[in-house]
Amino acid sequence: MGSFLQARRRHLILKEASREDAEKAGDLWNAIVGLGRDPPAKTFAEAVRDTVPPEHMAFLALDEVGAAYAFDLLWKAGKDVPEGASAFEMRSAAREQWAAFDKKAKQARHVSDGFGWDLAAAWAQVREVETAQGDMDRVERIARLAGRMFASLRGAHATKAHGVSGEVYSVEQGNDVARLLPSETVLLTDSQLEVVTLERIASRRAAQYAVRGTTKKSKGPLVLALDESGSMHGIRNEWAKAAAVALARVASEEKRPVAVVHYATSTVVQIVKPDDSAGVLKMILHFLSGGTAISLALGVAVDQVKALAQKGQHGADIILVTDGIDRNEEEQKKSVDAASSIGARLWTVAIECSISEDSPLRKKAAQYTELNDNAMTKGSSITLLAGAT
């Protein structure tokens, strides 16, 4: 942690406070981060030092962005403390602001964990949302859900055996050589047991992995078409945005590009990189409202797939999230067929609605799933898309 002189060069609130009263501002900063001399007796800075929550001391000493947030709260509160206030009154005022800081610290931690950011980036975005008078509680809910979804996807990946296409969920008997258990394949190297093992394979009695779903040997980009029509407010939108973050984190680990198509009756395309905290926050807060134009969204998604293919990124997956249909099945079919022709698969998630079995959104999808409101609160709901990652 740098000195007050260094910190005020990097934080506007410290610079402005220093112009008002450099000595008081320096004393308050040092009281917050635990640097320098003890603040003068019977001052607000002393009250702040005496009431610093023990659980935040180490964090405040190491994270300058978080400390600057605390300074902002306490500097404003200190100016409201009346002249000649008692030590008790000053401590009460300080504790009130520390309580507000504690809430934001917990939100920043949840944002950091859920989105995979470092704490400094999380604090910066918490302040960005507050400055824009956004709904930080909503961002926190999405972050916590995204974190659970990410963990569920990593867990689903852990159930996949190397070289086996699909999710391993049990062991069965069969004759699929590609799915044989190691205990079977090792017997094929023993000249005395090879004949017996081959006989078990031929008679479908060999031990092999039982799998469900399919995974591509080479993974391409992800294109997420997220419904932002008026009916997608609330938990529906939170699930869609949390899923986008979790999927982007997994894809990023494998160097796979991710594009999000925000759609209603118009579309906005955004490239999402999990380590771009400002970009992720922009994606989360984005909402178009209006009607639902799935055929339009699919057309834009296919254009993104083609653009990525031209850059050598083939075999994309298109994930369509919607809570309604637009009846334009002919255009939907054209877009789905166009995607299929260049090796892209469609995954359709219907939120609190049902799509006809004859619809190309369901009939031609690699997987079609319906989600109810209960499932949308669970991180495990994302595993329905594990095959796309």
Image: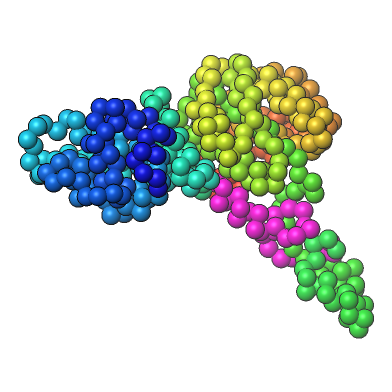
Report whether residue 170 is seen.
yes
Q: Residue placed at 32% from the left, 27% from the top?
A: 16
Q: Residue at x 79, y 22 (%)?
A: 334
132 and 163: which one is in front? Answer: 132
| Near-viewer residue (31 or 303) | 31
x%, y% of residue 386?
A: 65, 47
Could you say which quadrant of the image residue 67 lies in? top left
Place of residue 137 in the rendered image (x, y in percent of width and height, measured from the top left): 39, 35
Can see residue 136? no
Residue drawn at (22%, 50%) of the image? 38
Q: Which of 291 and 72 is in front in this view?
A: 72
Q: Residue lying at the far bottom in this picture: please name it.
A: 192
* Residue 289 sits inside the magenta stretch: no
Q: Is residue 154 magenta?
A: yes
Q: 14 and 237: which one is in front?
A: 14
> Quick check: 78 above or below 48?
above
Residue at image location 64% in from the left, 24% down from the top: 269
Colour option used: rainbow
Which residues lie in the magenta part?
149-176
Spot occupied by residue 76 in the image (x, y as percentages of width and height):
24, 31
Would you identify the image quadrant in which residue 168 lies?
A: bottom right
